[in-house]
Every structure is written in C-alpha cells, then in structure tokens.
Image: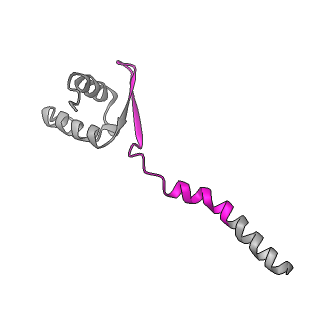
Amino acid sequence: MISKKLLLGSLFLSGALMAPMAIVANAAPQGVSVRFYDRDHKDYHNWDDREEHSYGIFRTDHPDYDSHFAKAKRKEQREYWKWRHEHPDHD
C-alpha cells in the first residue's frame, strides 16, 4: 500500500515539475531576435523579416553597402536608419 502511494505521489510530483517546461516549449516564437538602437531618432528597431526586406531595398539603392547590417560600419548604419525613417512601411 505504501509503494502505491509512493508511486502515485512521485507521478504527481513529476507532472507538476514538468508542466512549466511543457508550457514554455509550446509558447509561440517571438520572431524578433535582435533589436538595434537608432541614436539619431532615439528609438529601437526590431530586426525581423520586414526589416531585412527593407535593408535589401536600401542596399539595391546603395550598392557600396555589400555587408550585412550588423557588420556594417556605424556611419552606414546611421545612413540606413535615416533612409528607413524616410521610407516607412505602409501597412
């Protein structure tokens, strides 16, 4: 009888300890992994698919910038944020 109670208690305890992990594992991904601060405009920008697309358009207009944004020089990043504020998304 004691072994049944011990088994049942350990099963409940295991379930209680695993429940938070299951909830976190099923949480929807945020999609934003990097944020950049724009010093000139004093705001943050989430680097997501939309920003990647905009940076691709910027690089087409500015062929000198052939690197990824995170590896670009600070001056180039500032020029991108200036351009980005002049070309907002139209949802």
- Left or right, residue 56 beside residue 17: left
In the rendered view, would you say 14 is above or below 57? below
Q: Nearer the viewer, residue 37 or 72?
A: 37
30 magenta-colored: yes
User: What residue lies at 15% left-to-right and 35% top-to-bottom?
Assistant: 63
| Rendered image quadrant of residue 51 | top left
Q: Is residue 32 above or below residue 23?
A: above
- Look at the image and give the residue range highlighted in magenta: 15-44
Q: Residue 7: which quarter of the image?
A: bottom right
Q: Nearer the viewer, residue 75 or 14?
A: 14
Is 74 within the magenta? no
Residue 84 x %, y %: 25, 27
Asked whether 84 or 18 is in front, the reply is: 18
Q: Residue at x 75, y 70 (%)?
A: 10
Measured as percent of width and height from the top left, residue 28 is found at: 44, 51
Which of the pair 1/78 is nearer the observer?
1
| Drawn side of residue 65 relative to residue 73, left or right | left
Task: List x then y, in percent, for residue 25.
Answer: 51, 58
The x and y percentages for residue 57 are 17, 36
Q: Quadrant of the C terminus?
A: top left
Horizontal side, residue 33 vs residue 61: left or right: right
Looking at this rendering, what residue extends furthest in the front direction? 1
Q: Is residue 5 above or below residue 61?
A: below
- Occupied quadrant, residue 53: top left
Q: Quarter holding the N terminus?
A: bottom right
Q: How many marks?
A: 0
